[in-house]
Image (spheres, rainbow, N blue to C red):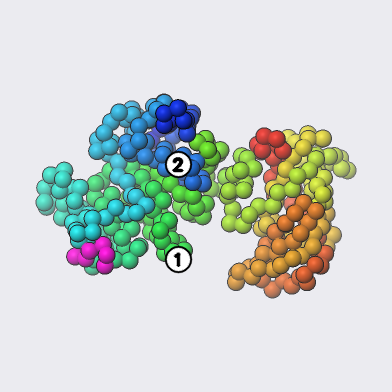
């Protein structure tokens, strides 16, 4: 088991700096997800952790020891790649055992570890098969087994589910999380998929253009996004953003938007006259005939378990989660309300949470 600590980490390629001043710590046994779009620096940070990329600035510590210049094989980490990186001419048993054979581990110990990993990952019936004879999920489990037998202190996952279909991704999410719950190995997991992050992580590190936007639990980044960017990136349904100005109405703070007036919590730090953008999640907005927000219905998209109502308002497209039995005529007037506690307020210029 191990901790991982990033102290003002930076990365440059020649004169081009892609990352600077990355600082956070991963506690022993934590499952931490690096989340962000392509090009944000998450995979580069993971590769620096593995020793596959050099650290240009700062210090990288594993279990309190600086590893900036330590060879990958000496870091006591194991990495699962996006493309599995299995040897096509080796059977499953050989793929899992290969790194142990290279390390000259005793044959009896190799057999014990491989059989343990195979049993844990439900691979025992497939040990005599080649990778081409396996499904995508089975190949992914072989890659995980290869990491497990090394008994590393830290597991690194680089977008391991991106090549799988949606149903298999959901299944493998559960398997990886269950594996972590059993082994308690410190894990760093990279993905661009916020659903993977929300369902698997103890802690999420949201990244953007080589910087950290927010670090927190899945509930924290969803309920209290630190910026407009985080609010937009996190959530199964796209959040509604309405620009407006903070006012005081009937002695309480509110925001006037073109779509209507939205009440804020009395504890808000937004100041009267301040230009803001408010974020309203579709699941928090309620269809309410007496509500202050007005729009015209465009389309109801039925998803089986519920439905999404798409409307056109003065601020553009507006989305609300509704009951799957709801009916709205196209072009009909619809009004909405939202509890003040569910309104996310961001400074219009800095996009930081207020």
Q: Residues within 10 Å of mark 1 (few under 14, many from 20)?
A: few
Comparing marks 2 and 1, which lies closer to the viewer? 2
Asked if residue 95 shows in the view, the reply is yes
Q: CA distance from mark 2 to mark 1?
A: 25 Å
> 291 or 232: which is nearer to us?
232
Residue 248: quarter of image:
top right
Taking the spot 18% from the left edge, 56% from the top edge, the residue there is: 94
Looking at the image, residue 48 sits to the left or right of residue 148; the answer is right
Looking at the image, residue 76 sits to the left or right of residue 26; the answer is left
**Disc 1 marks which residue?**
167
Rendered position, 48 above or below 167? above
Read off the magenta span.
127-133
**Disc 2 marks which residue?**
42
Q: Is residue 14 magenta?
A: no
Taking the spot 58% from the left edge, 56% from the top edge, the residue there is: 236
Taking the spot 35% from the left edge, 32% from the top edge, the residue there is: 54
> 106 or 22: which is nearer to us?
22
Which image quarter is the N terminus in? top left
Q: Horizontal and vertical percent for residue 60?
A: 38, 30
The residue furthest right is 250
Q: Residues within 10 Å of mark 2 (few under 14, many from 20)?
A: many
Rendered position, 55 above or below 301? above
Asked if residue 223 shows in the view, the reply is no
């Amino acid at each position: 088991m191990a901790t991982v600590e990033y102290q003002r980490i930076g990365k440059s390629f020649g004169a081009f700096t892609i990352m600077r001043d990355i600082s956070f710590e991963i506690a022993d046994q934590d499952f931490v997800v690096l989340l962000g779009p392509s090009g944000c620096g998450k995979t580069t940070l993971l590769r620096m952790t593995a020793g596959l990329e050099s650290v240009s600035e700062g210090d990288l510590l594993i279990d309190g020891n600086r590893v900036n210049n330590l060879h990958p094989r000496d870091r006591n980490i194991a990495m699962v790649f996006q493309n599995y990186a299995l040897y096509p001419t080796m059977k499953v048993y050989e793929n899992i055992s290969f790194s142990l054979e290279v390390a000259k581990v005793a044959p009896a110990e190799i057999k014990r570890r491989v059989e343990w990993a195979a049993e844990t990952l439900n691979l025992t019936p497939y040990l005599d098969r080649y990778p081409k004879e396996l499904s995508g999920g089975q190949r992914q489990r072989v890659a995980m087994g290869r990491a497990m037998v090394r008994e590393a202190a830290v597991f690194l996952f680089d977008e391991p589910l991106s090549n799988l279909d949606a149903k298999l991704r959901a299944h493998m999410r559960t398997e990886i999380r269950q594996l972590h719950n059993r082994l308690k190995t410190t894990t760093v997991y990279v993905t661009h998929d916020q659903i993977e992050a929300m369902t698997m992580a103890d802690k999420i590190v949201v990244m953007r253009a080589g910087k950290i936007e927010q670090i927190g639990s899945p509930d924290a980044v969803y309920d209290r996004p630190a910026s407009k960017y985080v609010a937009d990136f996190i959530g199964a349904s796209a959040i509604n953003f309405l620009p407006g100005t903070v006012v005081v109405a009937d002695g309480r703070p509110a925001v006037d938007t073109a779509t209507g007036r939205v009440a804020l919590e009395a504890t808000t730090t937004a100041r009267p006259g301040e230009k803001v953008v408010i974020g309203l999640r579709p699941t928090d907005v309620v269809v309410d005939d007496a509500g202050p927000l007005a729009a015209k219905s465009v389309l109801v998209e039925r998803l089986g378990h519920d439905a999404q109502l798409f409307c056109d308002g003065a601020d553009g497209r507006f989305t609300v989660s509704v009951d799957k039995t709801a009916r709205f005529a196209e072009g009909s007037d619809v009004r909405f309300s939202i509890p003040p506690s569910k309104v996310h307020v961001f400074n219009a210029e800095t996009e930081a949470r207020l």
